[in-house]
Image (cartoon, grey):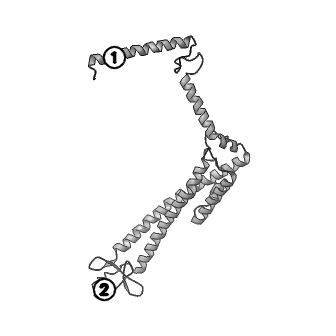
Amino acid sequence: MALDDDEFHDREARLEAEQRRRIHDDLANETAGRETGRIKRLDHPGEEPVGARDRKEKEERDRTASLTRLQVLLNDPTYRALYNDTFDQLRTAETATEAALEEAHAALSQTETDLQSTLDNAARLPDGTRVFRDADGNIRTEDGELVSGPDAETIVWKGGEPSYEDLLARRKAEGDARQRVEDLLRYQNDVLGPAHDRMEDPDNPPTPDELKQIQDDIEQGARQLGITDPEQELADASAKPSSFDLPTGAPS
């Protein structure tokens, strides 16, 4: 049955009175040192509030539990040196790859423009099909099909149209540029990304053998792609302070 306003306010007042009485009783019991079975409302003089203390203790336990394994390994000078070298090499490779990708995207954009210009300037059949003359004088569509007879006679050549070889060259350049972008992205996503994730895993940090494998994978990929050699970049930057931060809690 729904309550009217008066009944609602009466019940609300009774509940508030009951709550005040319970708080008063709890405070009296805690002051006397009697256990109430509920969360303490008072803290002992000089102590942090119970809730804040519990939160701090939990945060400290969580932080210690998540970093202990990596901290133990980083206390070994040999492991730490290998870890730092690998992280430096990884960051250098990431930077070099970003720069290479920027150049590759620009090159792809240019080759796409060149290809489209070649297509736009081609001669056409009455139905709009683009046609090109090859080095042997044959007329071909952009798909390479030969055009002859009455269809060939309908073509109006204005002079200066791109040749079929021009089309093939533009297509190859665009395809090569697109492949370059895809190769760099694959290296970034399949090699550098997983390596970064592995290096920053505090619960299960990489073993020395894994660190060496990460270095090998980075170097091999950079060499195959012809991007700046991470080892050379590292040598050039050796006089500069390391730019990476070890996971929180790692010894410096």
Residue situated furthest front in the rendering: 1
Q: Is 236 in front, or is 71?
A: 71
Question: Residue 129, position in %: x, y?
Answer: 31, 77
Q: Residues within 10 Å of mark 1 (few under 14, many from 20)?
A: few
Closer to the camera: disc 2 or disc 1? 1
Q: Is residue 124 shown above or below 64?
A: below
Residue that badge 1 annotates: 11
State how far apart marks 2 and 1 are (Cα). Answer: 97 Å
Q: Is residue 141 left or right of residue 95?
A: left
Q: Is residue 124 left or right of residue 109?
A: left
Question: Residue 175, position in %: x, y?
Answer: 46, 70
The picture quadrant where one finds residue 149 is: bottom left
Q: In this view, does 146 lie to the left or right of 126?
A: right
Kind of residue indicated by mark 1: Arg
Q: Is 40 in front, or is 163?
A: 40
Count of numbered circles on the image: 2
Q: Is 214 in front, or is 2?
A: 2
Q: Quick one: label 2 or label 1, which is nearer the N terminus?
A: 1
Q: Looking at the image, which residue is at 55% across and 29% down? A: 55
Say the numbered circle drawn on residue 152. Answer: 2
